[in-house]
Amino acid sequence: MTRSSWRSKTPGTTVIFRDWQYSILRPLPAGPSKLADIQNLIESRLHLLPPFRWRLAEVPFGVDHPWWVEDPDFDIEFHVRELALPAPGDDVQLAAQVERIVSRPLDRSRPLWEFYLIQGLKKGRVAVFSKIHHAVVDGVSGAEIMGTLFDLAPEGRDIPPAEPEGDYEKLPTSLEMFGRGVFGTPRRVAKAVASIPYILPNIADVPTLQALPGVSTIGRISDRARRAASSDGDGRVIDRDKLKAPRTMLNGPVSAHRRVSFGSLSLDTVKMIKNAYSVSVNDVVVALSAAALREFLIAHNDLPDEPLIAMIPISVRTEEQIGTYGNRISMMVVPIPTDEPDPVERLLRSHVEMSLAKDQHGALPANLMTDANNFIPPAVFARAARAITSVGANPRFRPHFNVTISNVPGPPIPLYVAGAKLEANFPISVVTDGVGLNITVLSYLDHLDFGIVGDRELAPDLDMIMDTLRDDLGTLEKRAKAKIKAEKKR
């Protein structure tokens, strides 16, 4: 059997964000004591994780998006490493170590992932820190990788054997890649032309493109033209509100260095609050994040009068795409009530804003972001991406959003890694120029695990954000219990 070396990438992901990593921190109570345990676990399941063998190949002159090729020199020892914390091995030291690891770009000449076994934590625990490029996974496919590597019992499970390996295809030369890119151009042009009727009127709703000069004007003119040409006069389902984010200390050029904070909140408490106020778990997460950002900016004398704008990633992965890899996300841009001092009012406003954003997003074509990225020629797309980041870092321009907030559902059952029980699962995501803070949440068992990452200069004191999340949850819990008690007396 010959294994194909060619893998098409998700368009645009590695062109826009040069060194995105999706990192997961996994403290384990009685974890594997040897690096070989983790290496053997991953190596025995590599045939179930095709992206772990892929590396990027750039197409000459940018005539096509980069392609995935199978790495003929794959070396598990390069990707799975070990280090130890000095005594006492507390969370502050662990966060500092994670900051150093996440600040280092992945080696783009190799498959874009790394695992670190971190020894020396308190109470005999260890951590497994994974660092996977966002071009390889999004939140959903990242959870699928977790499902492949984690087990439901300490003794593990039977893994189907890999098929016999055939000869790898010879890696394509630069000339071959250029030729394939050129010959694929007519197909891309035809697809782009076919997508014009719905791409142009909605192009300003694509977060990766909306910062480019002229995009909003193109979208507005195209939308009006479509309405005028419509035989039944039907236009967009929902009119776009042109949200403009206030500039804060979090919005500027990011450095190569990061700050990290992490912690867990009770999922049962969040669900109780959710039920008391008839909102969703995600609404509670957004409201808590708004409270933490409000207090953070007040402490730094930088809270704007208007609400902050959050970018909230959502999956557009279809049922047919379950089990595949790459990055298939869209984004909602939502005002969050950082201007509201009352916790309950903040929660109710978060619910309203999230509902409106979902309605607006639901009115857009499902594959808008992917197709819009394909709509632009690859070489132009790369230049546009650099222009977007430079606009985001320019203090003369207002950012399109202030912060990224992401909530990914995780497993409600215990998981194990090489015989060790998973205690918590903290997602550490990415920041980009113009948006120096990211709050990502992953549920596991009866808790929500928060991972907060920020630029070292733009977002100091991240532990303040984690502390405020806990305090505001406590306040909402008391208000919710009082509400439930009062309703029972009626």
Image (cartoon, rainbow, N blue to C red):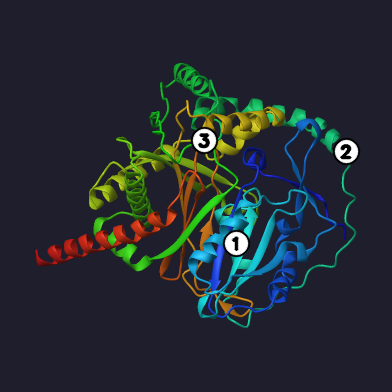
Query: Quick one: 484 or 390, which is closer to the camera?
Result: 390
* Location of residue 73 with respect to 59 vertically, above or below: below
Which class describes the residues within 10 Å of circle 3: few (<14), some (14-19), or many (20+)?
some
Q: Residue 406 vs residue 73: left or right?
A: left
- Residue 430 placement, left or right of 285: right
Q: In this orientation, does residue 144 appear?
A: yes
Q: Amino acid at mark 3?
A: Pro
Q: Quadrant of residue 99?
A: bottom right
Secondary element at tag 3: loop
Q: Earlier in the sequence, mark 3 or mark 1?
A: 1
Query: Callout 2, which amino acid?
Result: Glu
Q: Disc 2 to disc 3, how far (Cα)? A: 33 Å
- How packed mark 2 is, by other alpha carbons closer than 10 Å (few <14, some 14-19, many 20 or more), is few
Q: Residue 290 at what x, y percent from top left?
A: 35, 48
Q: Quadrant of the N terminus?
A: bottom right
The residue labelled by disc 3 is 207
Q: What's the amino acid at mark 1?
A: Glu
Quickly name the residue at label 1. 144
Vertical comparison of 351 with 189: above or below: below
* 369 relative to 277, above or below: above
Residue sitting at 66 percent across and 29 percent down? 383
Residue visible at 58% across and 62% down in the picture: 97
Q: Residue at x 54, y 65 (%)?
A: 94
> Which quadrant of the rendered structure holds the C terminus?
bottom left
Q: Circle 1 — which element?
A: helix
Camera-side residue of 104 and 349: 104
Rendered location of residue 418, percent (x, y): 64, 77
- Residue at mark 2: 176
Q: Can you give x and y, in whole percent of width and height, for residue 133 in the image? A: 64, 51
